[in-house]
């Protein structure tokens, strides 16, 4: 909406008129959605080769996902790593976001930048650094390395989303609770946490998606016999050319869309474009 | 008469700027005291200091002749009225009122009565 100044009977009023920017970005929509649409259509191919347009309709490749054992094992690994990493990232991220939002202290902006840095550094570089130190120097087992790596990539999302939630929190109610006799820790659990729970839930979902879909870190961390779901998809594409990958992609798109819908309902996606 | 509240040589500074410097105040029991002054002179700071929301850089705060300088907010048992009401948005009206009473371990019937 663009606001335009109009003079009416000597009084200046502002009237809204529709933005003309729509036609400028609308050609970009098919450019963005086109590939997703093609993938979705190819997932219903009845033949053995991935092709567009499909020659016959079938749901057999959706069924095939559950028959390929390496997908099921990799799916469990991804879920386990994402959930465990999410839990640790929450335990570290909630107090960090609270401290960064609540207090003013020396070096605050440096700490803030430090926590957000995993988003700014290219994943492939971060992955190589993890390979060098977590796997090379400390020789952690594969699961532990994945756990540490995924916690690091989830932490900035947890801190950023919860900080956004805390920016709307009125800290005077925290003081009110303390003046009524609540301890600092009690106030945090009975007043602060219930008021930012939608932000925490949104942070958990976004971080989970980021971890679950991650390729660039996981590709360095996985090893013999242990693989995450996206890495397993890559391996599968290298060896097979059937539409199973299209079917998986459609399912992942739906899962991601479902999660983002919940995040939108909880906080609104505008939170991630602010600040 | 012995003062109920005593602020002794209180100094408070934010970012190296003095808000209160060697401030002294005595309030006797039953007296109604108003703090008047221009914006930024330290009225709110004085109230927040008495309530325990902030600590003085220097000086002492006495309540009934006992040193309360380091006593935390939740142990002071002082009431504080916030400018923006400071209601708990996640609680009902009943639970807002009952919040402090529950912390003081009042029974359910007592809370409902009050």
Image (cartoon, helix red, strand yellow):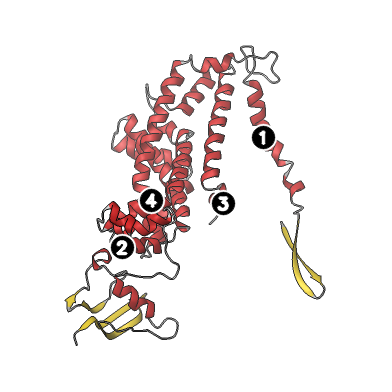
Q: Residues within 10 Å of mark 1 (few under 14, many from 20)?
A: few
For the question of whether residue A140 can be seen, the reply is yes
Chain containing mark 3:
A
Q: Nearer the viewer, mark 2 or mark 1?
A: 2
> The residue marked by circle 4 belongs to what chain?
A
In the rendered image, residue A246, in percent from the top left (x then y), is placed at 59, 23
Residue wearing tag 2: A180
Which of the marked residues, 3 or 1, is nearer the chain's N terminus? 1
* In-front residue for pair A219/B73: B73
Any mark on residue A33, and which?
1
Which chain does tag 1 point to? A
Q: Which mark is residue A273?
A: 3
Whether discs 3 and 4 lie on one chain: the answer is: yes
- Which residue corresponds to the image point at 39% horizontal and 57% vertical from the top-left? B96
Q: Would residue A161 appear left or right of A102 to someone viewing this image?
A: right
Q: Nearer the viewer, mark 2 or mark 3?
A: 2
Q: Which mark is residue A50?
A: none
Camera-nearest label, 4 or 2: 2
Query: With respect to residue A133, does B66 lie above or below?
Result: below
Q: Disc 2 sits on a residue from what chain?
A: A
> In what element is the residue under mark 3?
loop
Q: Disc number at residue A193?
A: 4
Percent position (x, y) of residue A108? 39, 61
Above or below for A179 versus A21:
below
Nearer-the-camera pick, A54 or A256: A256
User: Disc 2 to disc 3, how far (Cα)?
Assistant: 38 Å
> Can residue A185 be seen from the camera position used here?
no
For marks 3 and 4 on the same chain, the one whose residue lies earlier in the sequence: 4
> Which label's residue is closer to the chain start, 4 or 1?
1
Marks 3 and 1 belong to one chain: yes
Question: Which label's residue is closer to the chain start, 2 or 1?
Answer: 1
Left or right, B66 with reference to A217: left
């Amino acid at each position: 909406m663009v606001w335009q100044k109009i003079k009416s009977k000597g009084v200046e009023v502002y009237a809204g008129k529709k933005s003309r920017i729509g036609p400028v970005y609308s050609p970009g929509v098919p450019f963005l959605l086109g590939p997703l649409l093609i993938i979705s259509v190819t997932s219903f191919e009845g033949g053995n080769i991935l092709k567009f347009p499909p020659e016959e309709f079938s749901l057999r490749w959706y069924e095939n996902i559950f028959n390929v054992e390496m997908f099921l094992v990799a799916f469990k690994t991804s879920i386990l790593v994402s959930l465990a990493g999410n839990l640790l990232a929450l335990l570290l991220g909630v107090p960090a976001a609270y401290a960064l939002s609540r207090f003013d202290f020396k070096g605050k902006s440096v700490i803030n930048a430090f926590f957000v840095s995993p988003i700014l550094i290219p994943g492939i570089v971060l992955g190589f650094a993890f390979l060098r130190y977590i796997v090379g120097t400390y020789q952690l087992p594969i699961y532990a390395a994945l756990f540490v790596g995924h916690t690091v990539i989830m932490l900035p999302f947890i801190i950023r989303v919860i900080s956004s939630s805390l920016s709307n929190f009125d800290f005077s109610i925290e003081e009110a609770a303390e003046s009524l006799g609540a301890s600092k820790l009690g106030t945090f659990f009975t007043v602060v946490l219930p008021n930012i729970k939608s932000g925490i839930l949104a942070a958990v979902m976004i971080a989970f998606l980021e971890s679950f879909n991650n390729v660039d870190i996981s590709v360095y961390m996985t090893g013999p016999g242990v693989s995450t779901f996206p890495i397993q998809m890559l391996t599968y594409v290298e060896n097979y050319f059937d539409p199973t990958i299209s079917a998986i992609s459609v399912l992942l798109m739906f899962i991601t869309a479902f999660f983002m819908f919940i995040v939108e309902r909880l906080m609104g996606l505008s939170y991630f474009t602010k600040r | 008469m012995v003062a109920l509240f005593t602020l002794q040589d209180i100094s408070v500074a934010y970012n190296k700027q003095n808000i209160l410097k060697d401030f002294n105040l005595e309030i006797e029991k039953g007296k109604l005291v108003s703090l008047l002054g221009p914006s930024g002179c330290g009225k709110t700071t004085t109230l927040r200091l008495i309530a325990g929301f902030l600590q003085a850089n220097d000086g002492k705060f006495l309540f009934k002749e006992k040193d309360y300088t380091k006593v935390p907010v939740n142990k002071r048992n002082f009431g504080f009225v916030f400018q923006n009401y400071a209601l708990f948005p996640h609680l009902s009206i009943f639970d807002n009122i009952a919040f402090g009473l529950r912390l003081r371990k009042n029974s359910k019937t007592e809370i409902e009565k009050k």
